[in-house]
Amino acid sequence: MKLRLKSILTACLVLLVSGCTPDPKSGKGFTLPEGDAQRGMETFVALNCNVCHTVEGTSIEPIETEHHKIVKLGGKKGYVVTYGELVTSIINPSHRFAIGYPLDEISKDGESKMRLYNDEMTVSQLADLVTFLEQHYELEVYHPTPYVPYY
């Protein structure tokens, strides 16, 4: 009986420990160097991000063209926009598409219409850009309304 209990406990311990092994592709522990918001705004304009994006709370004017849908960045959101999501959106724009826009306006054949900047942007520019964008998002707190049945 004691041997069986020991075996069960050992098996549980092995399963528990193996379940704690992090995924090799995990973003845990990833961070960019600290960025500068002013330089990030300059990077945003220098890379012509304002051809397709506006940023809430800035005076950056979009460059209007008939071929691009303007996607709004920043503002109040009902969820936290994380540092990791911003980095991923910049370096892998096809990872997830902007909510609230028709897919045919922001993607083609399952890929984002946003061009890849990975070979054009330095790590410092990426850190600055994320710092700039991060400060323009605000969490909108959900305030539930009382349920009133409809009769």
Image (spheres, rainbow, N blue to C red):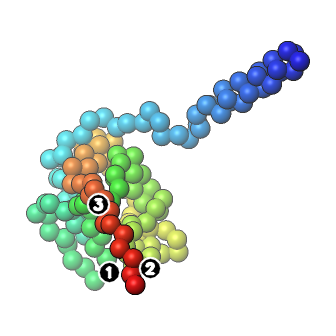
The answer to whether residue 10 is left or right of residue 83 is: right
Q: CA distance from mark 1 to mark 3?
A: 39 Å
Amino acid type, label 1? His
Label 2 and label 1: CA atoms lie apart by 12 Å
- Measuring from the top left, give residue 145's x and y in whole percent: 31, 66
Q: Is residue 19 left or right of residue 107?
A: right
Q: Which mark is residue 8?
A: none
**Relative to 70, is 11 above or below?**
above
Residue 132 visible in rendering: no
Quadrant, the C terminus = bottom left
The part of the image, by quadrant, that contains residue 15 is: top right
Of circles 2 and 3, the one toward us is 3
Q: Earlier in the sequence, mark 2 or mark 1?
A: 1
Q: Residues within 10 Å of mark 1 (few under 14, many from 20)?
A: few
Instruction: Tell which residue pokes out farthest to the front in this image.
Output: 151
Quadrant including the N terminus? top right
User: What residue does disc 1 label?
Assistant: 67
Secondary structure beneath disc 3? Answer: loop
Q: Are marks 2 and 3 in contact (CB under 8 Å)?
A: no
Rendering coords of residue 8 (x, y %): 80, 25
The kind of residue tagged 3 is: His
Q: Residue at x 81, y 17 (%)?
A: 6
Which amino acid, by three-letter code, is at mark 2?
Asp
Residue at 39 percent of width and 66 percent of height:
98
5 and 86: which is toward the camera: 5
**N-terminal label among 1 and 3:** 1
Q: Earlier in the sequence, mark 2 or mark 3?
A: 2
Label placed on residue 104: 2
Q: Quadrant of residue 117?
A: bottom left
Answer with the quarter of the image where residue 7 lies: top right
